Each structure stands twice: as structure tokens, then as C-alpha cells.
Image (tube, rainbow, N blue to C red):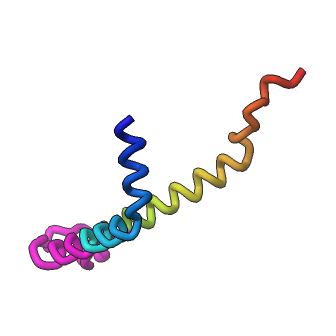
Amino acid sequence: MKIVALIDFLKKHIGRVRIVCLYSLLALVVIDWLFVDKSPAHTGPEHYVAFWALFGFVSCVAIIFLSKWYGYLGILTREDYYDEP
């Protein structure tokens, strides 16, 4: 299982993974700031640097928390649910 080996490798080097992710994010923000034309933007917030990156991050976090909340409302159940008489 190559996926399991990849996950284990990433867990072992979590510090380096975080550094690579932060530098990648910084590079994308700099590229957005320097090279992306913001003149055809339709709304005001789209003119800000890294607006869509921040919007995407906040949206993902909201989806995760809403999914967990919805799951704990009643979708999640015990594994032995069908074993009861």
C-alpha cells in the first residue's frame, strides 16, 4: 500500500510538511500580488490580495465543522447497530 507508506512518511516529517505548505502559500500570495490582474473583478473583496485563498480556506473549515456537527446530530451511529435484537 503506497498510500499508507506516504501517510506514514508525512507523519514522520510533519515539521517539514508544515514548512513546505507555508512557503507554498507564501509563494502563491506573492504571485497573486505581483502577476494577477484584478481589474476584471466583479466585487470589491476580489481586489484584495489572496482573497480567494482566504475564502477557500474559510469555506473548507466551515464545511468540516458543519459536517461534524451534522454527523453528531444523528447520522453517526454505533458499529453494532444492526446486531441488537
Left or right? Give the position of 35 relative to 83: left
Left or right? Give the position of 30 relative to 20: left
- Looking at the rendered image, the quarter that the N terminus falls into is top left
Residue drawn at point x = 9 percent, y = 73 percent: 35
Asked whether the viewer can see residue 43, the reply is no
| Quarter occupied by residue 48 | bottom left
Q: Is residue 66 above or below residue 54?
A: above
- Residue 42 colored magenta? yes
Q: Position of residue 52 (x, y in %)?
A: 30, 67
Q: Position of residue 72 (x, y in %)?
A: 71, 49
- Looking at the rendered image, the quarter that the C terminus falls into is top right
| Quarter occupied by residue 56 | bottom left
Q: Is residue 69 above or below residue 37?
A: above
Q: Position of residue 62 (x, y in %)?
A: 52, 61
Nearest the camera: 84 or 67? 84
Nearest the camera: 79 or 67? 79
Residue drawn at point x = 24 percent, y = 69 percent: 24
Asked whether the viewer can see residue 66, the reply is yes
Nearest the camera: 84 or 5? 5
> How many numbered marks, from 0 up?
0
Which stretch did the figure color magenta? 26-54
Q: Is residue 68 above or below residue 37?
A: above
Nearest the camera: 36 or 31? 31
| Quarter occupied by residue 51 | bottom left
Q: Position of residue 79 (x, y in %)?
A: 73, 33
Residue drawn at point x = 69 percent, y = 40 percent: 75
Judged from this view, the residue extending furthest toward the top is 85
- Residue 40 colored magenta? yes
